[in-house]
Amino acid sequence: MKKNMISIIILALLVVNIAMTAIMMFSVIPANKKTIALIDEISGAIKLDLAANTPEGEAAGSSAQNVSLADSATYSIEDQQTFQLKKGEDGEAHYVVCKVAVLMNKTSEDYTNFGADVESGVRDPLILNAMSEVVGGYTYEDIEALGQTGLQEAALERIQTMFDSDFIYQVALSGYIVQ
């Protein structure tokens, strides 16, 4: 008799559990759909691409030109560079360590003016100074939020402004470490 009574209680609790789960699902799913719709609207308003990459394989939001490999020249500054970040809330000194390389469009008119100087290393101090100015304007927290791609784009914009040309179409940072 006790075993039958316990079985009936367990069955009743099971039915109550299923009913409560069903009620919870009907109340949570519409709220979840509304949250997803709100996030989609916000990301659309600030023009974020939820996909990691575009079909061309470039990072979304990248300002890089489409230059074929045959029309591209790469110059890498020999030594690994250390750039100091602006002091943040913690008051500690932080650094970005990386090797800097620039990709140039050989078909650009300005490549004939500046390309030889860049490739010979004559413009290294200018490029490194521009990198230092860009990196030095960020705190550790800013760099962590910006990421390597964001830093590359900021450096590219500064270098293009410095040369007043877009013959340098990409800045590459290899061995990128933030400490």
Image (spheres, rainbow, N blue to C red):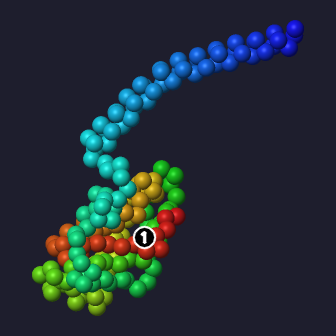
Q: Residue furthest left?
A: 109
Question: Residue 31 versus residue 62: which sits nearer the camera?
Answer: 31
Name the residue: 28% across, 91% down. 120
Q: x, y percentage for residue 95?
A: 47, 66
Q: Which amino acid does the dot numbered 1 rest on?
A: Phe
Indicate the quadrant where residue 123 lies.
bottom left
Q: In this view, does 54 lie above or below 45?
A: below
Question: Residue 6 versus residue 27: which sits nearer the camera?
Answer: 6
Indicate the quadrant where residue 173 lies.
bottom left
Asked if residue 110 shows in the view, the reply is no
Q: x, y percentage for residue 179?
A: 52, 64
Asked if residue 140 shows in the view, the reply is yes
Q: Is residue 71 above or below residue 157?
A: below
Question: Residue 19 versus residue 153: which sits nearer the camera?
Answer: 19
Indicate the quadrant where residue 40 lies.
top left
Q: Left or right: where does residue 63 sit relative to residue 139?
A: left
Q: Left or right: where does residue 156 sit relative to residue 114?
A: right
Secondary element at tag 1: strand
Question: Residue 34 versus residue 98: which sits nearer the camera?
Answer: 34
Name the residue: 72% across, 15% down. 11
Quadrant location, the N terminus? top right
Q: x, y percentage for residue 158?
A: 25, 67
Name the residue: 33% across, 62% down. 59
Residue named by callout 1: 83
Q: Is residue 126 above or below residue 60?
A: below
Q: x, y percentage for residue 136?
A: 38, 64
Q: Left or right: where does residue 4 sit relative to residue 41?
A: right
Name the residue: 33% across, 65% down. 57
